[in-house]
Image (cartoon, rainbow, N blue to C red):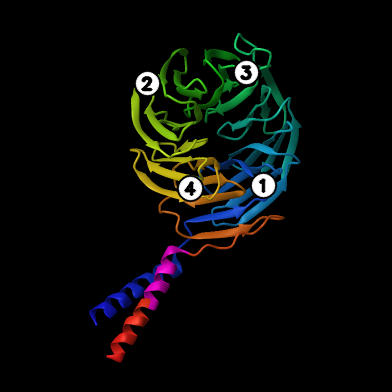
Amino acid sequence: MKRTALIIALIVALVPAAAGAEASYHGVSTGGIVNDVAITADGKYMVAGTSNGGIVCLQRDGTVSWNVSAGSSVAAVAVAGDYVAAGTEGGDVLLFDGNGGRYWTKSVAGSVRDLAFAGDGRSLAVAADRIVLFTNLGKEEWNRAMQPGARSGDTRPYVTSVAFTNDGKFIVTGSSNGAILFMNREGKLIWEGLARSAVTAVDASRDGSVVATGGRDRALQVYGRAGGLPWALPTGAPILALALSGDGRLVVVGKEGGDVECYRPNDALLWKNRTGSNVPAVDVSRRGEAVAAGNTGGTVYLWNSNGDVRWSFDADAAVSAVALSDNGDYLAAGAGERAFIFRTAEGPVTAIAEGTEGATTDPAQAGGAGALVGLLAVAAAGVAGRLRRR
């Protein structure tokens, strides 16, 4: 009799929670491989850019609010306020409002490899064959070529990564020939750094007082706003992804081979976690409360600032991109042909999948609590039956 009472008590306790629980994540099929994702500062919605030219906007409640085509593979996306930008491999740069209405389309030389907004969204920096700055009205304010340099060989260098400070005063870029440029809003070069091979990622604190770069040369470099000799540290493997907290206190790198490492700039390694396969995507919240990563093995990870795992999620495909809201309470990710948005406060146990226009709708996945309630109900019925037969 005690066993029956215990099972019934568990059912009673779980049923209300399962019935009223908000889904902890949502996933949608985008119809093409997700190349990049971005999320608003408040986590209200995320945007995914795909290999088939799709730009998909997913609300945090799982609603696909809009889905448009850029005409060619979308390599990079960015969001700021009510602005959404996308850049294509064909060299187009597109600006939308938060409802998917298109403001303008401009063309740049070469494929777009990265995009970065100033904090207010009124300026957009584009990394392509040149670094180009547009206003939100579509005016090209200036562009700068990357100088060939001694390490370029016969291939003309191009811009690989770009970051804009939140106050809109400074821009940092990395290039295929190892050049690192720190410029003001008007495009004037303030200082230039140099890596020993291609720079894969750059980032800047909100005020530009800390700049971090990583590349194929296996070195993490950290500069101050004034430039000069950087704090440099060998990481043992090529850096594939890098993110700096908004306050400049933490820098996270994802490496070839599967390691995710967190450093205190100008100080030391704080922690390291191994994921088992290449890590092409990392992000960190504004004050470092949350650290996210995705690996080619198909897993999305979330850690706290101490490197303790909060949860992990099997995305069933190589993870290409992750992005955290400012406070780390929402996480966007792209894996294969799916885009995900997570509430980070709890592990992803309930999924609701929505189809995009012209895309395949994924079936909803059962929540863990609901499944447990069903099993407990069956168990309770079995126990009750055995008791009645006695």
User: Can you see residue 172?
Assistant: no
Report the Cα–Cα distance between label 1 and label 4: 23 Å
Q: Is residue 189 left or right of residue 6?
A: right
Res 199 → quadrant: top right
Q: Pick out the residue farthest to the bottom.
A: 389
Numbered disc 4: secondary structure = strand
Badge 2 is on which residue? 266
Q: Residues within 10 Å of mark 3 (few under 14, many from 20)?
A: some
Q: Residues within 10 Å of mark 4 (few under 14, many from 20)?
A: many
> Which numbered disc flags the more N-terminal residue, 4 or 2?
2
Q: Residue 306 in the image: x percent, y percent?
A: 33, 38
Tag 3: amino acid: Gly
Res 76 → quadrant: top right
- In the image, what residue occupies the spot 37% across and 34% down? 272
Q: Which mark is on residue 32?
A: 1
Tag 2: amino acid: Asn
Badge 4 is on which residue? 330
Q: Residue 15 in the image: x percent, y percent?
A: 40, 72
Do callouts 3 and 4 mark residues in contact (Cβ within 8 Å)? no
Do callouts 1 and 4 mark residues in contact (Cβ within 8 Å)? no
Query: Of circles 1 and 3, which is in front?
Result: 1
The region drawn magenta spans 367-378
Q: Is residue 293 left or right of residue 95?
A: left
Tag 4: amino acid: Tyr
Q: Which mark is on residue 81?
A: none
Query: Of circles 3 and 4, which is in front?
Result: 4
Q: Residues within 10 Å of mark 2 (few under 14, many from 20)?
A: some
Res 179 → quadrant: top right
